[in-house]
Amino acid sequence: MNIVLLSGGSGKRLWPLSNDVRSKQFIKLFKTEDNDYLSMVQRVYNQICEVDKAANVTIATSKTQVSSIHNQLGKQVGVCVEPCRRDTFPAIALATAYLHDVKGVSEDEAVIVCPVDPYVNLDYFQAVKKLGELAELGDSNLTLMGIEPTYPSEKYGYIMPTDKENISKVDSFKEKPDTETAKTYISQGALWNAGVFAYKLGYMLDKAHELIDFDNYHDLFNKYETLTKISFDYAVVEKEDNIQVMRFSGQWKDLGTWNTFAEAMEDATIGKVIMNDTCQDVNVINELDIPVLCMGLKNVVVSASAQGILISDKEETDFIKPFVDNMDEDIMFADKSWGSYRVLSKGEDSLTIKLNIKAGSWLSYHSHASRDEIWNIVSGQGEVTVDEDSRQVNKGDVISIKSGSKHMIKAITDMEVIEIQMGKEISVNDKCKFKFD
């Protein structure tokens, strides 16, 4: 099956574990058999591969998330990068053109689109596979998955089928209602619209060409910034008459807030956490190297990271976004394709960060015009190149790099490096990359 996972998110609602680079789908929450943790994107990707080992998975995302995707899934997964945000229709049009022009997918093959971060079991992706099979039959131009509602939600739009059969024609769509209206919809057989749908690639390619003037994927990519922002629902769904919906009654949750996120935690705590016996219904995630002690708390979520510390009543976490929007803060941690980094301290003309570099990975060969750097090798073994002069480094070694010098580091084993940056301009703009053989 060809499946496109839409990966967006601003990283606001799960602050301080999320930021502009790491959205909720990259937070490691789900415990594995070997006591490690998986993120939502890792869990979803593993589930897809378990249902269909030959699945052709493409993640449609912004360039800020590419490093996190490669860090957590490797470079074997397809990535369709949006040059900028233009809502869901342009993103789906670009991904469809990418599948056809870059990956060579036929116009007669089905493509399934779904969010990257649902909290589901394997039966969900078995249903997703069935959705693609229905789309390939060609009885309808669009085949949607409708979630059987478990309560009258005000958070979701509703699909109104013509009957209550497992597969039905769609009569209409309803915007997010109030609770009483939602009850009426449900009594009429309405389904939650989870944003999961399938189509033949040729159908969507034709729709894209109808609404956008472009020649191929590369042309569309180059003019992406000029496209009108419009959702897939407004651009396509609401104008399409030939739509069917397939019911799904298994587990499906949208972990969009700290309240719902805490419900999915298998352990009440992650990281260095101590709670006394008087704590009730408390969840704590601590990504810092110092302990967090909780005493006498009830119905509270606590989260600590390099980005900040949250202590909140669980119900109040639904209202976190306006406060985070008003914070003027730098990104203090990020996953990269080579590993991860965390800011340790920031001065007026200096920045100290900790780099964790995975074995076999390396930082790009680059230089800085306005700052010097010092690398302190805390652990591991690697190879450092400065101005084409390479040497092996080990724990305890210190490398000084003057501004203007080309430099890179490759990890032979997993490495931990403390990097000290000193200069008048310490920013991502002060970096020039070079090719290195």
Image (cartoon, rainbow, N blue to C red):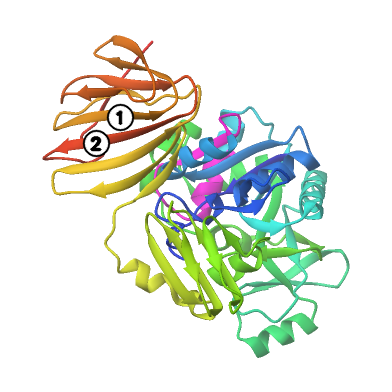
In the picture as drawn, the residue positioned furthest to the front comes out as 276
**Is 152 rendered above or below residue 275?**
below
| Amino acid type at image mark 1 | Asn
Residue furthest toward the bottom?
A: 180
Q: Which residue is mark 1?
A: 376
SS at mark 1 in the image: strand
Q: Image height check: is 367 above or below 323?
A: above
Q: Nearer the viewer, mark 2 or mark 1?
A: 1
The picture quadrant where one finds residue 72 is top right
User: In the image shown, does 140 or 272 lie closer to the viewer?
Assistant: 272
Give the image location of residue 292, x and y in percent. Answer: 47, 63
Spot occupied by residue 123 in the image (x, y as percentages of width and height) = 82, 54
Residue 81 lies in the magenta stretch: yes
The answer for how far apart the CA atoms under marks 2 and 1 are is 8 Å
User: Residue 420 shows which numbered tag?
Assistant: 2
Most extreme residue toward the left is 424
Question: Which percent across, then down, holds residue 388?
Answer: 28, 10
Q: Quadrant of the N terminus?
A: top right
Segment tinted magenta in the rendering: 74-96
Tell me if residue 257 can be seen.
Answer: no
Q: Is residue 338 left or right of residue 391?
A: right
Count all numbered tags in the image, as a single digit. Answer: 2
- Other-residue count near label 2 (Cα within 10 Å), few / some / many at <14 / 14–19 / ≥20: some
Indicate whether residue 161 is drawn in magenta. Answer: no
Residue type at tag 2: Ile
Give SS at disc 2: strand
Q: Residue at x 37, y 73 (%)?
A: 322
**Foreground pick, 185 / 14:** 14
Residue at 60% x, 67% y: name it: 262
Ranked by sequence position, the earlier of labels 2 and 1 is 1
